[in-house]
Image: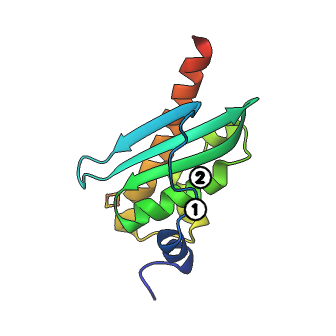
Amino acid sequence: MALYSDKVMDHFLHPRNVGVIEDADGVGEVGNAKCGDIMKIYLKIDNDIITDAKFETFGCGSAIASSSMATELIIGKPVSEAMELTNKAVAEALDGLPAHKMHCSVLAEEAIQNALEDYKSKQKG
Ligand code: FES
């Protein structure tokens, strides 16, 4: 069996939603100290719905595929639902990641949560 699913390869080779949202409503950045990979997520939120999401990932193929899939999963979703997106759900949507690559999908979960926290903190101000 191939190490990576077709979906992982597809999202790695043709990542969706790469880029920056200049006037983002929430931005989240996380890094993995072990591998040194970094992921940044930008969200546009309107009326509590995520209308756009973009990412910049300086990392391995699994991290790029995870950010691509994660942004696809949250666009159009309410903030509360996006907050509950787990790395497991991202990996499942990619038809699985090798066990030693599961931590790469954790970056996507954490970056999205950070971006949502950033959005929420801006709302309070
Ligand atoms: Fe660092 Fe995948 S090896 S995120």
> Which class describes the residues within 10 Å of circle 2: few (<14), some (14-19), or many (20+)?
many
Amino acid carrying mark 1 in the image: Arg
Q: Which mark is residue 16?
A: 1
121 w.r.t. 56: above or below: above
Q: Mark 1–mark 2 contact, CB under 8 Å?
A: yes
Residue that protrudes farthest toward the top in the picture = 125
Residue found at x 56% / y 19%: 122
Give whichever of 90, 122 is nearer the camera: 122
Judged from the image, the secondary structure of the residue bearing numbered disc 1 is loop
Cα distance, mark 1 to mark 2? 8 Å
Whole-percent x and y of residue 69? 57, 60
Query: Based on the displayed image, in which of its 4 quarters is residue 46 positioned?
Result: top right
From where the camera sits, is residue 97 visible? yes
Q: Which mark is residue 83?
A: none
> Which class describes the residues within 10 Å of circle 1: few (<14), some (14-19), or many (20+)?
many
* Disc 2: which residue: 71
Ligand 1 resides in the quarter of the picture at bottom left
Whole-percent x and y of residue 24? 57, 34
Residue found at x 57% / y 54%: 70
